[in-house]
Image: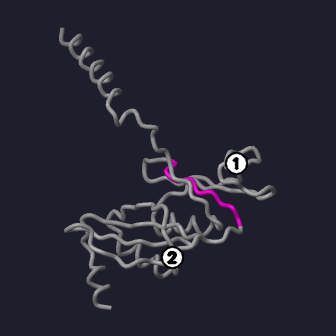
Amino acid sequence: MLIRTLVFLLAFLAVTHSQLPFAQGAGFRRWSPVVSNLEDTIHLYTDILGFELGEVSTDPPESYVYKVFNVPPGVVTRHAVFHDGDQKRVLSIVEIPGLPPQKTDGVRRSLALFNARGRFDGIVEMLKADGYETLPPQALGSSGIEMGFFDRDGHLYALYEIPYQGSYLTKESNQ
């Protein structure tokens, strides 16, 4: 009787869960920004942000990348895939060589948000040392911090940490 009840309960939960609104979405898979220099972007994501590089490859001529990004004829694209711990393939960066950077002084249309996971001060110092354009940091709620920055292609990022245990806001206000 107990086994039959458990089987019924598990079947009920499976059916109920599949009908919840959040289980019906398309399912976000990964972000794929276009960059002009893959090596520089690999440095940003691995050495500064701490992602693991999965693979780098040249896209074959029949790749859908050429169509969706409207790549000019004759240009060969490459991509790099990144992992974040046990989350595999969370980023797929596409390189189209020679693209000019996006302007960073107008209305910005997208943002990639990253949790610093206790490394906020170190990441900010590396970004600044490497010459990345940064926006002023600010308090995030009562216990956090956030700061925007741009990669070399003009993509906007926000770095945050909650709770924040560092001293970056104090250092910035003293300068």
Q: Secondary structure at mark 2?
A: loop
- Residue found 75% across the figure and 44% down from its top: 62
Viewer-nearest residue: 89 or 76: 76
Identified by mark 2, the residue type is Asp
Real-space Cα separation, disc 1 to disc 2, in angstroms: 29 Å
Q: Is residue 5 left or right of residue 146?
A: left
For the N terminus, the quadrant is top left
Q: Which residues are magenta?
A: 89-97
Above or below, comparing residue 162 to residue 32 in the picture = below
> Viewer-nearest of labels 1 and 2?
2
Q: Report which residue position mark 1 lands on.
A: 67
Image x and y of residue 132, in percent? 50, 77
Above or below, comparing residue 141 to residue 65 in the picture = below
Image x and y of residue 44, in percent? 52, 68
Above or below, comparing residue 59 to residue 17 in the picture = below
Q: Quadrant of residue 121?
A: bottom left
- Residue found 34% across the figure and 27% down from its top: 19
Q: Is residue 70 left or right of residue 31?
A: right
Q: Secondary structure at mark 1?
A: helix
Find out whether the residues at labels 1 and 2 contact each other: C-beta distance under 8 Å.
Answer: no
Scheme of colours in the image: one colour
Q: Report which residue position mark 2 lands on.
A: 105
Earlier sequence position, callout 1 versus callout 2: 1
Residue 70 among those drawn in magenta: no
**Residue reaching furthest to the front:** 107
